[in-house]
Image (cartoon, rainbow, N blue to C red):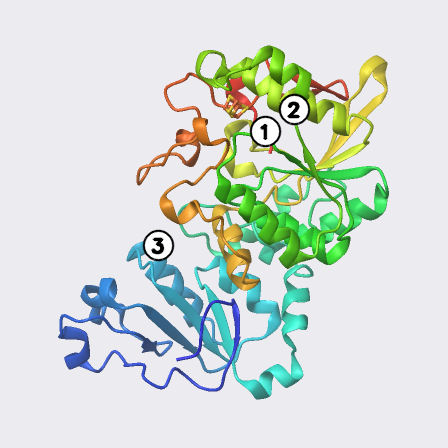
Amino acid sequence: MPALDLSLVSATGVAANAVDPSDVDALSRNTDIEALRLPPDADLSEIVDALPRIQSIFVEFAAFTDGRGFSLARLLRLRHGYTGLLVADGQLIPDQFAFALQCGFDAVRIADRELARHTPEAWDAALDAFDLTYQRGYAVKPGPATSIFDARLTAMEERKTDDPFFGLGAEAALRRAIAQHDGDIFLASSLGADSAVLLHMVSRIRPDLPIYFLDTGKHFRQTLAYRDTLIEQLGLTNFINVRPDRDELIEQDPTGALHEAEPDACCALRKVRPLASAVGHFGAQITGRKRYQTPERANMPIYEPLDGADGEPGMVKINPLGYWTAKDVTAYIRRHNLPPHPMFALGYLSIGCQPCTTRVAEGEDPRAGRWRNQGKTECGIHMVDGKWQPLEKKETFEAF
Ligand code: SF4
């Protein structure tokens, strides 16, 4: 079987060693099944018991007009909780790529002769050019399955927004923002579990865009190694490490233990003030915030102008991933074969400074591991009237 770590896989035919649902022997043996081939009219009741042992399922698409494979994928993911690799295999066209990912597929595999007509670049580009109904996150919400008719209604409802960037795919929104605020826009990256997505997009659009990283002096060494890997692999040429003021550090945190007694003061010293002085002159900031993360972000636009002092316009926040779900992030990372944060596989789903980050148990909110048992949930960086300010309502805001 070919390596399947990309979302678009070029190969001819179905995996050579794939079994099919009529192979009762293979399904009933209590051993792992590397790959299963499913025709579009498959009866899932025949394979449900074997699902936990099946590593990958190839759903056949005999023609792009046959949508039964999408229904199979949704049933496998939502009703039967299948967590293995799910591949749409066969006669798909680029217009169906985003919808396939939304339905739960991890990858699309098409025959080489089809790739001669629609190149991988065409498939990539198609993700950003789809009708809103198929656009990632805009219409199909996380949660129970949504019919295509529900999705269209939702999309029509969402269109009423006055967000000028509404309807753009993430990369298209980022491209437009960088062009619109040329020379006056930056990305603040936390080098967390999701950060590779925006860094990768920036590398494709403007690798010399200013990218600021708060080098607090308290990060995991794996985070610093991850930073160096991404900079080199993505060819980022304007990466800026922002460090705390040396004199303030000596004066306010001589032993390096301020985070234990006064975490807010520590964040102010190591994050809030250094970032404020580094980026205060910019007019626009790119963030990785997403609508699904908190109730306060549920209506967040992609293009988010903030009020400035004295009625003047303040800084603009650009949230290209605003409509993305966690699954979109995973799909993007897989599709572009981006390296994951080394701590992620160890159960650290939200990654900050080492003393203030712990593992997250299964089923816990990913951010539960930050400042655990300290009554603190955010680092305290906030933009008020176009200026960086310490945060008063700490429970509702995350800068990155
Ligand atoms: S996250 Fe913890 S160690 Fe890092 S700056 Fe804040 S309090 Fe200090």
On residue 78, which mark appears?
Answer: 3
Q: Position of residue 336 (x, y in %)?
A: 57, 62
Q: Residue at x 35, y 54 (%)?
A: 78
Up-down relation of residue 357 to residue 257 (above or below): below
Work out whether residue 253 or residue 59 is closer to the camera in this orientation and state it: 253
Q: CA distance from mark 2 to mark 1?
A: 7 Å
Q: Amino acid at mark 1?
A: Thr
Q: In the displayed structure, does residue 250 sit left or right of residue 47?
A: right
Cα–Cα gap, marks 2 and 3? 47 Å
Q: Is residue 296 visible?
A: yes
Q: Which of pointers 2 and 3 lies earlier in the amino acid sequence?
A: 3
Q: Which residue is mark 1?
A: 216
Disc 2 + disc 1, Cβ < 8 Å: yes
Q: Position of residue 154 (x, y in %)?
A: 56, 46
Image location (x, y in percent) of residue 296: 55, 27
Work out how far the residue at label 1 is from the one at label 3, CA to CA, in angstroms: 41 Å
The quarter of the rendered structure image containing the C terminus is: top right
122 above or below 200?
A: below
